[in-house]
Amino acid sequence: MIRPGAIAIAGAAETTALGTIPELSEIGLHADAALNALSDAGLRPRDIDGLACVGPMRPQMVAHYLGIIPKWVDGTAVGGCSFMLHVRHAAAAIAAGYCSNVLITHGESGRSRIAAMPRLAEPGTLAGQFEAPFGPLGPPTLFPMPVLRFMKTYGVTHEQLAMVAVVQREWAARNPRAFHRDPITVADVLNSRMIAYPFRVLQCCLVTDGGGALILTTAERARDLPARPVYILGSGESVETPMVSQMADFTSSRAFRVAGQEAFRMAGIAHGDVDHLMIYDAFAHLPLYGLEDLGFVGRGEAAGFIAERNTAPGGKLPLNTNGGGLSYTHTGMYGMFALQESVRQLRGTAPAQVPGAKISVCHGVGGMFAASGTVVLGNEPG
Amino acid sequence: MSTIKDPVTKGQPPRPVPTPETQHFWDGTRAGKLLLQRCPDCGGKAYFPPRPFCPGCGSRRVEVFQASGRARLYSYVIHHRPAPGFTPPYAIAVVELEEGVRMMTNILDCPQTPEALELDMPLEVVFTRLDDAIALPHFRPAKGTRA
């Protein structure tokens, strides 16, 4: 097993702009983020010998566009948490000696759709045969499918689910780059436009343009580079099913549990050691599943935990401090932005800085509970 | 076999394309039968969606059987935007069959409202013909239980 802290993030940056970027195509967003991250790390494209981005065929596009000659490539594409898996795979590759400096890039023209990756639905797949004929229309209809069962099982109220969006807007209000910054109330959420009951538009993620990039290397090398190193203490990954209707337990994600437990085990940390938490919030119920499946609270306790402001500014477990996918940005694959916020918090450069944050857990989802990746980061090598 | 009616009122929903591994299921719905598979090596445990082996133990010695068609409403969303073949608002539901498996479906003969769609309400299967090759398994409130 890789020693916690053996590999570090030596460069991290988002695209120069975020939100609506009609002047860049998708590959251009990859490149803008990559160049910003290289600058942050004090490196040039020729220093990079490992490359990861969400496929299919993306690694060769990005390598060619940026003039990178990789000897290690990862095109893992399991949805919005793919970047957590890239971090995990890259750490292993560097530790194994396959490569020295890995660049992970994300670019997505989710809003402007300029040369964007096609969204395919194949009618012969199991999802095409056994879900598509019943009228789902993308994530807003599929992701909330388990929510009513979760609410009935644990007695969660609509007001509590609205509080997720309210609290995250409080964080976003502190972040000049957040897409939405105006305060909202529970009543605002519950009176906003219905998308797919029980969720209204303020409980659904944004659709934006943007990107981000990370550079990983050995801890030793990272200490010689200009940016403050952020160490990889542990990581985990898993998948469950591409069909939300077939997830084994509608009140808990198996992929979350497997990825989270492995990341905590590798890092050798307890929940009380965690200063800062990111849980990929494509929709308002995801922080509830994340808090419970990662073991921060007991079964059925997450909704009350958030409603009682434990994750809000000033609370004991700061969560989604950039404003999250609900208020900060969501290109379609938000995991990269969750990782960027964890890095900022551990460098001490976040707009809504958590004082003295030393350990951050960054947890992602791919598809509709289909995949998961968890990364434990620290600003000390462990 | 019912005809397409509320909430499926306009156009055609995305049409499933059977594969060799799922053809028996769609042959079944066309004949008015809901066919599942089960594994004798796993105590006859039913599974879904179809595949020619048991997802529990990997055994290829599996059998096809007809489900009772009885189910309960497990979870759902009510979609408020238009989609091909559907007029909003319409519910997209997951039902749990008496045999233990869950499947996505639509709920017919029932107002598409949170008040009418009560979790755990008993349902029964009904088949909706799309064309000569495909009938979709839909569900409606079980007879004798409607208000």
Image (spheres, coloured by chain):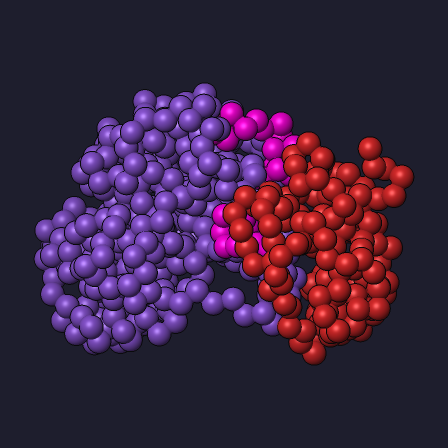
Q: Nearer the viewer, residue A169 or A241?
A: A169
Please state the horizontal and vertical placement of residue A327, each as a whole percent of the image.
Answer: 34, 38
Observer able to see residue A216: no
Where, quadrant-wise, is the C terminus of chain B in this rendering?
A: top right
On screen, residue A351 versus residue A202, left or right, reads: left
Q: Which stretch appears magenta?
A: A135-163
Q: Give the number of marks.
A: 0
On screen, residue B34 versus residue A364, left or right, reads: right
Outermost residue on the bottom side: it is B20
Q: Nearer the viewer, residue A360 or B78?
A: B78
Please state the horizontal and vertical placement of residue A65, each as a whole percent of the image.
Answer: 20, 73
Residue A196 shown in magenta: no
The residue at 68%/32% (across/down) is B115
Q: Image height check: is B101 above or below A320?
A: below
Q: Nearer the viewer, residue A115 or A105?
A: A115
Q: Image height check: is A295 above or below A187?
A: below
The residue at 36%/23% (across/down) is A315
On screen, residue A170 versus residue B115, left or right, reads: left
The residue at 65%/37% (across/down) is B113
What color is chain B drawn in? red
Where, quadrant-wise, is the N terminus of chain B in this rendering?
A: bottom right
Provide the major secondary structure of the magenta segment: helix
On screen, residue A131 versus residue A239, left or right, reads: right
Please state the horizontal and vertical placement of residue B54, each as a whole percent of the image.
Answer: 73, 67
Outermost residue on the front side: it is B10
Observer able to see residue A175: yes
Outermost residue on the right side: it is B144
Please state the horizontal and vertical placement of residue A160, each as a whole percent of the image.
Answer: 51, 26
- Residue A97: image quadrant is bottom left
What color is chain A drawn in? purple
The residue at 28%/63% (across/down) is A114
